[in-house]
Amino acid sequence: MSLDKGTVKRVAQLARLRLDDEQLEKTAEELNKIFTWIEQLDEVDVSNIEPLASVTGHSLPERMDEVTDGNYPDRVLSNAPDRASNFFTVPKVVE
Amino acid sequence: MSSILDLDLASARSALQKKEVSAVELTETYLSVMSSNDHLNCYITSTPEKALDMASKSDHRINSGDALPLDGIPIAIKDLFCTDGVLTTAGSHILNGFIPTYESSVTENLWEHGAVMLGKCNMDEFAMGSANTTSYFGAVENPWRSDDRQKSPLVPGGSSGGSASAVASRLALAATGTDTGGSIRQPGSFCGIVGLKPTYGRCSRWGTIAFASSLDQAGPLTRTVRDAAIMLKAMAGHDPKDSTSANLQVPDFESALTNDVRGLRIGVPREYLLDGMPSEIEKLLETGIEMLRTAGATIVDVSMPHTKFALPTYYIIAPAEASSNLARYDGVRYGLRIEGDNLDDMYEKTRSVGFGAEVKRRILIGTYVLSAGYYDAYYLKAQRVRSLIKQDFDLVFDNVDVLLTPTAPSDAFAIGENDDDPIKMYLNDIFTVPASLAGVPAISVPVGLSKNKLPLGLQIIGKMFDEELVLRVGGALEGMAGFKSRPAGGA
């Protein structure tokens, strides 16, 4: 398989990254090399093998569904690039 | 002349408790050599005021007989750990100006043990790299200089390169690192120090900026195996704020250091001997085998057939998790924001300016392998191969107690070398990634010098939560190797 510039452009859009034409070209070339190398996994027979998502082997712990933290908006907002009272701000989304 | 800087962590601890040196005196010494070694670029932020304040509190406790286990020990923190009130960057521009209002669990544990923070260490951006050349704050230098390449500074390895260089240069007594695919062990090997990646779940991930959540694990970089045992004891422990943190007692790792390897079965996986690998790496492994055999261990030739698939598997799983973890950097809640015409425009501008080339590359790989139509072929497939890799470890540990392998396929290379070839850079982690995928603990111990007179480490890999045996064998190897060489640079 081969990633063309169009595919890279689409993936970049999904990831909210912007690449200019020259970067698209270079990135497509690099990613193709990497995926060609990754394709050695085709040699492995994984039929009847379960996917492994976690190595811990234990199930996630549970706790009571109650508030254990919070109520300090100033701390939460202290790193906001821009804020309006107790809110983060974004460019206008709805006209 | 012997200097206070010659004391390793264990010796400094005893000197402090015996009041032969004060915490403030020790801290001032470190702060002074840090400022005269700026060119190594080990630290992104130094915190002298905080350090002296913490040291004076340590002195107070020591003097009143309430000393904590690490009181007065000056350490460096990889800049991936959030530190309350102290700039935290992850080596990235996208976290521009980020000052956490909370403390990571690992650093909190260290401060509760009395340790003193010297500053925050440089690192590959978001811990993605094997040379510490991807940091927004510039490359880190290794204090070692090659016989062969006198003029060009060498990389310290990565991603915990600033931490490793700081410890090797004597700009910190010890440091924290994180290891996702080798980021503690490979820089440990390149810098001639000890690097320990604990079992996945041994140290809490809470407050540590995420790269690949199923792999990330914090651990220490230290001058000796004993120091690693001391640091790990302070860093580890169950944390309800990390659901994958292991609910287990933290053993007294130091008491495991008996140096006795008699009767142990030590496996050497034949798949770790690669065609085209420098012969000095193979020779180093032979040296290690001989030492452990002489000490009474039984060396067992073992096979782990899926080893060669670990690296390509890692380069699907880690970028997939990273692309998801790094989606949070959107210019809204913290860090860099580049204004745009609309919301998407702002996201794209912010992320395009804020992330460096390697991080973008991995986000793109991750987004692609998780995207509709490719998920099964790549991500699910990689998770299945990961099962087989873990199975290799499960099976081999029915037969042996620990494994012995090289840590890295080469010694430290020059800054800039390998930067234009991602796959070549990724191959640095060929021996460290399998243990990461399996979640098992592993340590790198300096054992010898390459022909360029640069340090080389060997790796001991153990069973899940058997850091004690990993440390015991590592300590025995360290004792027999007697690695005493010191770098030309640093304090």
Image (cartoon, coloured by chain):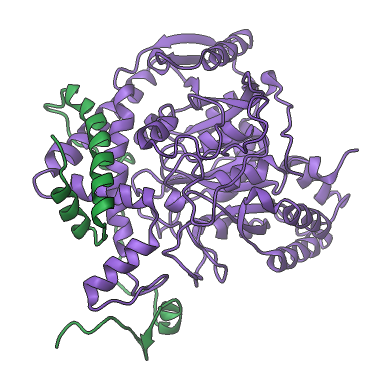
Chain colours: A green, B purple
Vertical position of residue B14 compared to residue B94: above or below: above
Given residues B261 and B308, the one toward you in this image is B308
Vertical position of residue B468 compared to residue B41: above or below: above
Residue B290 visible, this orientation: yes
Q: Position of residue B185 (x, y in %)?
A: 52, 35
Q: Position of residue B436 (x, y in %)?
A: 39, 36
* Residue at (61% x, 43% y) in the render: B141
For residue B178, side relative to residue B450 (left or right): left
Vertical position of residue B37 compared to residue B84: above or below: above
The residue sitting at the right extreme is B1
Q: Position of residue B466 (x, y in %)?
A: 48, 32
* Residue at (35% x, 13% y) in the render: B303
For residue B167, side relative to residue B16 (left or right): left
Given residues B419 and A85, the one toward you in this image is B419
Q: Quadrant of residue B35?
A: bottom right
- The total of numbered circles placed on residues is 0
